[in-house]
Image (spheres, rainbow, N blue to C red):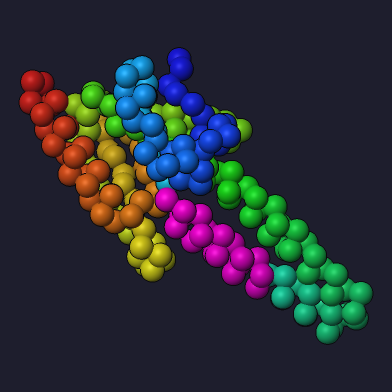
Amino acid sequence: MELGSTAGGGAAEDEDGTGGDGTGDAAGAAGRGEPVWRGLPPGLLRMRRLLLALWLGSAALGAGLLPGLLAGPGWALCALLPLAALAWGWVLLGRNWRSWRYAERADDLLISRGVLWREETVVPYGRMQLVEVTSGPVERRFGLATVQLHTAAAATDATIPGLAPAEAERLRDHLTRLGEARSAGL
């Protein structure tokens, strides 16, 4: 099933995954019946990379300083392992961030994510029971919020992380209105 272009796959896409001008080519996609995909804001990537650098930078300092002082300067090379993990994680976080996107259609919400294993979740508006906006202390510091969709199916993982609080509230209100309208006939 073809649902549109893949995130990160087009040369004209920029960091927000929209296509260069930030509009996502809504008129062209709507005319072809394709969903209009929205990427996650770059604040989520900055937050995750900062946390990665803090944790693995501290680990590199501890892995290099303690063995270097206690066992000799050659053991200070142990700091290279956390630094290598930091470099690898930096790249992987960017790829993961680019893979997340969502689209609002007439009858359902699409959420797409994953680099190696692509996962697309379709949540019909009429099946939604609860739309929740959460923001932990670190997310609040970076001005981010997460939208969590709850349905009758316990296995549904419908989460959109790292949205701006205003966009998360708009999406929550919009999905709640659509969910109430679609479920009225049940």
> Residue sitting at 84 percent across and 83 percent down?
70
Give the image location of residue 109, x and y in percent.
30, 30
Instruction: Locate residue 69 relative to residue 91 in the image: left or right.
Output: right
Write the start and end of the magenta stretch as one range. 41-58
The image quadrant of residue 157 is top left
Most extreme residue toward the left is 184
**From what the image shows, is residue 110 above or below residue 57?**
above
Q: How many marks?
A: 0
Question: Quick one: quadrant of the N terminus?
Answer: top left
Q: Where in the figure is residue 183, as x and y percent of width and height? A: 13, 26
Q: Quadrant of the C terminus?
A: top left
Q: Between residues 175 and 28, which one lies in front from this camera angle? A: 28
Seen as rendered, the residue at the extreme bottom is 69
Q: Quadrant of residue 131?
A: top left
Is residue 125 shown left or right of residue 158?
A: left
Query: Can residue 132 be seen by looking at this rendering?
Result: yes
Residue 98 drawn at (x, y percent): 52, 42
Is 155 magenta? The answer is no
- Does 135 appear above or below 38? below
Q: Residue furthest front?
A: 21
Is 66 on the left-hand or right-hand side of 152? right
Residue drawn at (84%, 80%) of the image: 68
Q: Position of residue 13 (x, y in %)?
A: 51, 38
Q: Main secondary structure of the magenta part?
A: helix
Is 54 contained in the magenta span? yes
Residue 123 seen in render: no
Q: Residue at x 40, y 43 (%)?
A: 22
Residue 110 or residue 185, whichever sits in front = 110
Using the rendered view, name the quadrant where residue 115 is placed: top right
| Whether residue 104 is situated above or below residue 107 in the rendered picture | below
